[in-house]
Each structure stands twice: as C-alpha cells, then as structure tokens.
C-alpha cells in the first residue's frame, strides 16, 4: 500500500464515478463507491461493470479482489471515517436547458447527515458556476463537522475513459482553500498529469468552456462540410489543410452527423442558460446547438432528396451509440434519425455491437434489431452509417453492394475512402464529400 493512501468515498457509479473509483483504487487508495441503484451495486460486487467502457471491468475486478475497492448502497457505511468524498452524480438537463441540481442537493444532505470526521468534498460532476459555493452552504447548514470543498471537473471521454484518466491533458483543481487543494493534488500525484489550480468558479467555468469550445469546433467543421459538398470541395482535404495551422490544430475536425452523448448537448444548453442568468445572450453557442440539431438529421434529408419518398423503404442502421466504444445512447443521432425515418413511412433494422439493450429503451418500438452488420444489410434497401465502430469500418463496401437491394449507402461518419466506392456498382453518399453515383443514375 502506498504511504499517502487515502480513504475515499465516491458517490455515483456512472461513467464518471465508477471510472474515478476504479482509477483511484488502482493507484493505491482505499475506495468505497456508493450508488442508490442496488442493481448496479449488486452487479459490481459480482464483477460485472454496469457500463461498457474498455478496460474498466478488468481493473474493477482486480481492485475489488485486492480489497482496495468496494461498493455499497449505504451512505452511512460509505462515509464512515473517510478523508475525501467525490461527488459524481448526474446533472441532467431540465426542460428549459438548465442543469438539474436535484441529485447534487440530495448528496449534500447525505454528506451532512453521515460524515463522521473532517472531510474534503470534491465535485467531479459538471455543475454551473457558483454551485460549489452552494454545496458548501448546503452542507454547512446541516452539519457541525468541518469540511472543505474542491471543484475537480472531469474531462474523460466515454469510450476511452480509463485511458483518459491515466493519460489526460490536465487535472483542474479549483478551491478557495489551499490546504484542501493540496490534498487533492497529492491524491492525484500517481497519475503523473499536469495539475492546474484555480479558484472554485474558474474551475467550474473551465469545464463548460472546454465542452462549449469542442462542440463549436464540431458544428463549425460540419457547416464547412455542408458548404464544401455544395461547392465541390472535399471536407477531408479542407480539414487536413486547416489542421496544419497549429493555431487551429488537426484534431476534432471530423465532419459527420453531429455530436451527441451525455455531455456536449446538455452542457452547451446549460451554458446558454448560465449566460442568460447573467444577462448575456450567448449567440455563438445558440448557433452551435442549432447547427447540431440540423446536422443529426442530415442523412434523413439526403435520403429524402435522393429517393423523393422514403415510404416502404427498409433501412439498415449501422451503429446506434452516440460514438464508438460506448453503450451510451444519450442524445445519439440514431434516436432522432430513427424517429424521422419511421415517421416518413420507412422501416428500420438496426445493429450495434454493444448498445442494443440501451437503444431499446430510447428508439421507437417499431425498430427491429439484429446481431450483425451482415444481417442488417441482408434484405434492406439502403444503409445509414450512424456510428464509426471499428466493426463497421472493417466491413468492405463491396458487401453493401452485394447485399443491399438499392445498392445505396448514406455514411454519416465518412467511414470509407471515396476511391473504394468509385470502383463499385454502388451509390455512396457521405458528409462534405462529393456523392459517388452509379453511371445510370447520373444520366
Ligand atoms: P450517470 O447518470 O451515468 O451516473 C450517475 C449515477 O449517480 C447513477 O448511477 C445514479 O444512480 C447515481 N446517484 C444519483 N444520486 C445519488 C445519490 N444521492 N447517492 C448515490 N448515488 C447517486 O452520470 P455520468 O455520465 O457518470 O455523469 C456524472 C457527472 O459527470 C455529470 O455531471 C456529467 O455531466 C459529468 N461528466 C460526465 C462525463 C461523461 O462522459 N459521462 C464526462 C465528464 C463529466
């Protein structure tokens, strides 16, 4: 056991909480994760991760076996004699776009009612600027035990969350209490990442500003892509040419059918609301959100333009998760796309390597599910590529040509090189690149 090992509780075992708990135990701390959801806790105790995230389950099993990691539904048990409590519960979007604080508020009361000694409370959840001060007040008004508050926003990406935790670009530690900030910096030392200390409000803003900037980059490149395809330019060449400029950078310039997931959609909307609360109309971010909503439906628009009507068409939807290597379906483009296709009279047969059970909870009931790319393509008229899973990218375009009745593909993630389509008897539509059409369709 490392000498500086701390006793830590992590509240919430979702994508952030479980990864945080597992990673902190892996670097030698003693971690107890607490979640209200008893089925999650039971499953973790049996060695089954409730979420799909590469490498997570193996590390979870290892640290549980080595007794540095445990799970409970009981806050009293989790908070007994701990040095630090991480808050990693959800902050979902409310109908008006603001962040819902109900889980945060209830954790504050759980903390106040159950701590047995002085603790540092660390907020990992993404929370509006000023929330950590609210957390401080709420806990303080319900306990006499001393505590301090630190904002430590999370930057992991779903699909590579474990990798990101050990190889992230920075750790932001916001606090108005230097000693508490030092304790959290010390806890994170074994990760060997750059630590940047700020005040509480700056740390909260860094998280929203980072997500808003990344979402802006995506909507920007998608607008350039849409313009490129109507002007005869190729977005891949355009993005590559832009990316040579170090001020722009070459990453996050992939055109596609927009962003989804549990963070960018809700955090951009929350920041617009936060700005509104300060009488600031965040026009740029409003436009980013609007562009993304339109972009998620790009394949439906393209297919309607190509076919005239989608009535009676059978569409193979490849990939459902909002991005590869995750089972997370929150705000996935596949949801609105499937809804619109069914509304237009089409039928949808869907495949995803991991996300089908989550997809069943959010896609229209009429969607049919199959167990492979090939099964989805067989008997379908056309294919919509929604997620750039490795398995999808490895499927040769010639298989689409062989199996699809209409020999037409709408690729929302630019999975294939245009040359591959050029050599086939296939109509291939992608994002921001010229359509490749069979000769007979052209004339
Ligand atoms: P999630 O919805 O996957 O998990 C939240 C968990 O908290 C659930 O299991 C829920 O049962 C549990 N919970 C709620 N109230 C509780 C309570 N009082 N006590 C114990 N458990 C409780 O959420 P997530 O995706 O892990 O996100 C958590 C936070 O981190 C959010 O604020 C999110 O914006 C932020 N974040 C998420 C990501 C991501 O990629 N998912 C990345 C960075 C930041």
Image (cartoon, grey):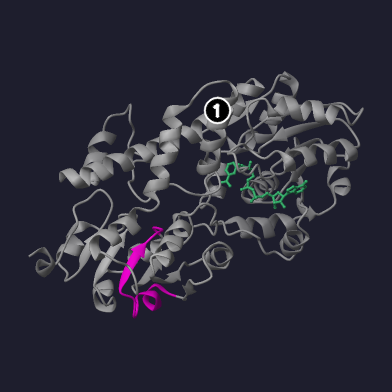
Decide: is 226 above or below 376. Answer: above
Of residues 147 and 62, the one drawn nearer to the viewer in this rendering? 147
Report helix, strand or loop for mark 1: helix
| Residue 435: percent from left, percent from top | 19, 57
In the picture of the structure, the residue carrying the numbered disc 1 is 206
Label 1 packing within 10 angstroms: few (<14), some (14-19), many (20+):
some
Q: Quadrant of residue 155?
A: top right
Q: Residue furthest left?
A: 443
Decide: is 276 above or below 239. Answer: above
Mark 1 CB within 8 Å of ligand 1: no
Residue range in magenta is: 372-388
Res. 96 visible in picture: yes
Residue at x 65% of width, y 39% of height: 125
Decide: is 92 above or below 37. Answer: above
| Drawn side of residue 57 relative to residue 210, left or right | right
Task: Specify whether residue 355 is painted magenta.
Answer: no
Residue at x 86% of width, y 30% of height: 118
Res. 7 visible in picture: no
Of residues 230 and 141, the one drawn nearer to the viewer in this rendering? 230
| Drawn side of residue 57 relative to residue 290, left or right | right
């Amino acid at each position: 056991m490392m000498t500086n090992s701390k006793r830590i509780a992590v509240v919430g075992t979702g994508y952030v909480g479980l990864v945080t708990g597992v990673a902190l135990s892996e670097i030698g701390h003693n971690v107890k994760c607490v979640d209200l959801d008893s089925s999650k806790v039971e499953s973790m105790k049996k060695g089954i991760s409730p979420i799909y995230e590469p490498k997570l389950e193996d590390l979870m099993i290892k640290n549980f076996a080595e007794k540095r990691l445990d799970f409970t539904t009981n806050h009293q048990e989790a908070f007994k004699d701990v040095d630090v409590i991480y808050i990693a519960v959800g902050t979902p979007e409310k109908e008006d776009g603001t962040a819902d604080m109900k889980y945060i508020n209830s954790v504050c009361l759980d903390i106040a009612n159950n701590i047995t000694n002085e603790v540092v409370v660390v907020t990992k959840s993404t929370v509006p600027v000023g929330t950590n001060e609210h957390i401080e007040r709420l806990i303080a008004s319900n306990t006499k035990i001393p505590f301090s508050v630190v904002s430590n926003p999370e930057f992991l990406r779903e699909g590579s969350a474990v990798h990101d935790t050990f190889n992230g670009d920075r750790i932001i530690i916001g606090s108005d209490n230097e000693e508490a900030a030092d304790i959290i910096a010390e806890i994170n030392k074994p990760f060997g990442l750059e630590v940047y200390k700020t005040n509480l409000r700056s740390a909260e803003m860094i998280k929203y500003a980072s997500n808003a900037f990344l979402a802006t980059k995506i909507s920007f490149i998608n607008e350039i892509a849409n313009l490129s395809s109507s002007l005869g330019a190729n977005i891949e060449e355009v993005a590559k040419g832009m990316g040579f400029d170090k001020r722009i950078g070459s990453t996050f310039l992939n055109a596609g059918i927009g962003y989804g997931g549990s963070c960018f959609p809700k955090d951009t909307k929350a920041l617009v609301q936060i700005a509104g609360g300060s009488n600031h109309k965040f026009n740029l971010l409003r436009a980013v959100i609007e562009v993304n909503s339109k972009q998620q439906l790009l394949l439906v628009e393209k297919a309607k333009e190509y076919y005239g009507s989608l009535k009676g068409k059978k569409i193979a939807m490849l990939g459902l998760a909002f991005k590869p290597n995750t089972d997370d379906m929150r705000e996935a483009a596949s949801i609105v796309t499937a809804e619109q296709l069914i509304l237009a009279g089409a039928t949808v047969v869907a495949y995803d390597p991991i996300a089908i059970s989550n997809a069943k909870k959010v896609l229209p009931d009429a969607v049919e599910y199959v167990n492979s790319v090939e099964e989805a393509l067989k008997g379908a008229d056309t294919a919509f590529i929604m997620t750039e899973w490795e398995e999808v990218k490895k499927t040769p375009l010639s298989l689409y040509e062989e199996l699809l009745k209409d020999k037409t593909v709408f690729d929302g993630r630019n999975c294939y090189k245009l040359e591959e389509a050029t050599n086939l008897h296939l109509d291939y539509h992608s994002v921001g690149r010229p359509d490749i059409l069979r000769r007979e369709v052209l004339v």
